[in-house]
Amino acid sequence: MGDAEARSADDLLPEPEPHRVLGTGAEPEPETWPELYRHLVRGRRYNTQATVLTRQGRLAVYPSSTGQEACQVAAALALEPRDWLFPSYRDTLAAVVRGLDPVAALGLLRGDWHTGYDPRALRIAPLCTPLATQLPHAVGLAHAARLRGDDVVALALVGDGGTSEGDFHEALNFAAVWRAPVVFLVQNNGYAISVPLAKQSAAPSLAHKAVGYGMPGRLVDGNDAPAVLSVLRQALARARAGGGPTLVEALTYRLEAHTNADDAGRYRPDAEVAAWQDRDPLALLGAELRRHGLLTDDREAALRAEADDLAATLRAGLGTEPALDPADLFAHVFATPTPQLREQARRLGVASA
Amino acid sequence: MARALNRALRDALADDPSVHLLGEDIGTLGGVFRVTDGLAAEFGDERCTDTPLAEAGILGTATGMAMYGLRPVVEMQFDAFAYPAFEQLVSHVARMRNRTRGAMPLPLTVRIPYGGGIGGVEHHSDSSEAYYMATPGLHVMTPATVADAYGLLRQAIASDDPVVFLEPKRLYWAKGELEPDVPPGGQAVVRRPGTSATLLCYGPAVPVCLAAAESEAARERGWDLAVVDLRTLVPFDDETVCAEVRRTGRAVVVHEAAGFAGPGAEIAARVTERCFHHLAAPVARVTGFDIPYPPPLLERHHLPDANRVLAAVAGLQWED
C-alpha cells in the first residue's frame, strides 16, 4: 500500500471552472436525467415537509438541504447497492434517495433514537453530527473492503465548514496513502451556519486541497444534477478500479437557514439568496428536460402528485407518537449490560436487558 | 510483560484473520516499546500497519474497519499522544452500538501505554484512565501481571465491545509466568489476602501495594494488609471489592492519576455507599498530586510509594 506512482501536481488540479452539463449543449441522457428530476421534485417536497414538521413540533430540528438537492440525489444515485454512503446531519435526503424509509431516516431529528435504522441494511452509516468525523470512518471501511477483496467503494459527504476540521485532513491523507476506494464530496453551500467561506479557507478552491494529498480534485456545479452525477460516477469508477480517492467540490447554496432554529437574515443579504434561487437545481434540470421534450405538463403534475404522497407518508409517520421504551436506555450500551447498568435499570423501574 | 503482550497479539493475529493492528512505528520498528516486535514480518504490512502520524485518523479509520466487520487493535504510542483521538473515542467508538440500537457493535481495542516512573519527559507519563472511565460505552482494562497482560489482552481483542487497554509502561519489563487461563475481565483478584485493611489498586500501583503489605514496617505495626487488583475499571467489580472491604473494615485506594475527581473518588464513594456499616474509618486515597505530571527528576515525589501507602493505613483511625 502507499505505493501510488508519482503524479504531477498539474494532473491533480481541479478544472478552472466548475464542470457543467446543463446549458452546454450536451445531449440529454433519457436513462438518467428524468430519474434525477423525479428525485429532485420528491426531495424538494421532502425538505419542505420536514421543515413544516419542525414548526409543528413533530421534529426536534431539521437541517434542510433545500437548494442542495442535486448533490443529495446525485450522491445516492451514483452508488451501487453494495457501496457505502457516509452522510452528515444535512444529508437525510441522500439516505432517503438511496432507499431508506423516509420516516426512519428522521429518527435522529425526531429524537426517538439517534439512528433510526440498521446501517448495514442499506449500507448507510449513521447520520453524523460531529463535523467531518465520518470521513475517516469511510476511509477505514473502504480500506477494510479492499483488504477483504470486496468490490465496494465508500462515498463520504461533508460541508465546506467541515473541511476546516482536522479529521478532514487526516481522512484525506490516510485515503491517499492507503489508496483507499473512497470519494469525498464537499457540498460547498457557502456558509458554515453563519460564517462565509472566505473566513473558512484561503484556498483557491476547496477542491485544490486534494493536490496536497496526492489525489485529484474535481470542481462541479452542485446545482447541475447531471454534472454532479457524472463527476461522482467518474470518481467512483476510478476508486473501484484501484485508482484511489478523489475529492469533489460541488458549488451549491443552502436556500434555507442552517436549521429551523437559525435566522439566516442576520448574516446574508436577500439579494444573494434571490440570485441562487434563479439557479435552483429543479428549475435548471426541468427547463432542459422541457427543451428536449422529456418533460410535459402531465408528467410534471404526476411527479408533483408522487411528491405529495411522500409528504403525506411523512406527515402520517410523524403524526403518531413514537413507541418509546425507557429500558432501551440500558439495552445497547454494551453487548451484555454491566451489573451497574442492571442496577440503574432496576432503579428506574424498567426491566434490565 | 511486553513479551506477553506481543505473544497475545501474535496469537490473536494467528487465530482470527479479522484482527488488524494499526499504529505509529508498530511495523518495521516493532513499536517504541517493542510490543509488536516481529509481527509485521510474520503477518505482513496489511495485518500490522505503520500508519501516518495522526491519532484521530488512526482511531477513525479503525472505526470504519470495525464497521465493516474487522477487529482492529490500535496502538497509541503514549498516554498523552492519545488525546487527539479523544473525539473519535468518545463521540463514535463508545457510542456506535448504542446509537444504532445494537445493530452495529464496534469490536475494537485501543492499547495505550500509560503512567510514569520511567523517567519520561513531558507528555510521556500521564495516567489518563479517569477520562476513559467517565465515558459510557467503553470497557477499561489494565493488567498488573504478566499473566493478565496476555490473558486480558486476548479477552479485550475477542470482546464485541470497544476496550481501552491501559498498559502500565513501567511494568513492561516486569517478569512473570503466562497462565493458560486468567479470570474474566470485570473481575477483581485478591493478590494478597489480609485481615487488617484492604488496599484497592490496579496497574502500576499493584506492585507498590504488595511491597507495602510485605514490608517490615507493616509487620512491625502488626498489619496484615489485603491487596485487591481491580484489573478492570469498567465494568467495576463491586462484589469482590466490597466483600474484601467488609472483611477488614478499612480500605485505601491507591493510584497514580490525580486524586481530584480521579478513579479513587468513584471507588471510595462506591465502597462507602455499599459498606458504610462495616467501615471503621473513612476510605482513604493515596494518589498522584493534583498537578500536571512532573518532570522526570521530580516524579518520585509525585508517585505513590509504599511509605505513602503505609502512612495512609496508619491514618485509618486504629485508636477507635
Image (cartoon, helix red, strand yellow):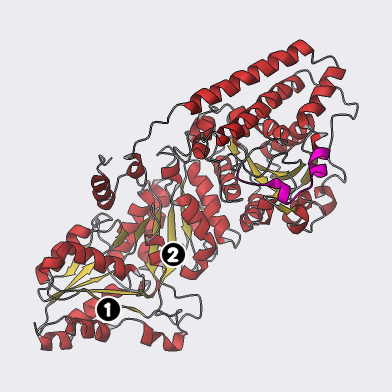
For residue B208, the mark is 1
The subunit letter for the residue under badge 2 reads: B
Q: Is residue A247 left or right of residue B69?
A: right
Q: Is residue B225 magenta?
A: no
Looking at this view, is B97 or A272 the one in front?
A: A272
Query: For residue A72, which quarter of the picture?
Result: top right
Front residue of A285/A119: it is A285
Percent x, y of residue B197: 14, 75
Please state the extent of the stretch shown in magenta in the rendering: A261-275
- The residue sitting at 84% across, 14% down in the picture is A293
As helix, strand or loop, the secondary structure at mark 2 comes to: strand
Give the residue type at disc 2: Ile
What number is the disc on residue B112?
2
* Relative height, residue B67 to residue A34 (above, below): below
Quarter occupied by the C terminus of chain A: top left
x then y, percent, for residue B123: 50, 75
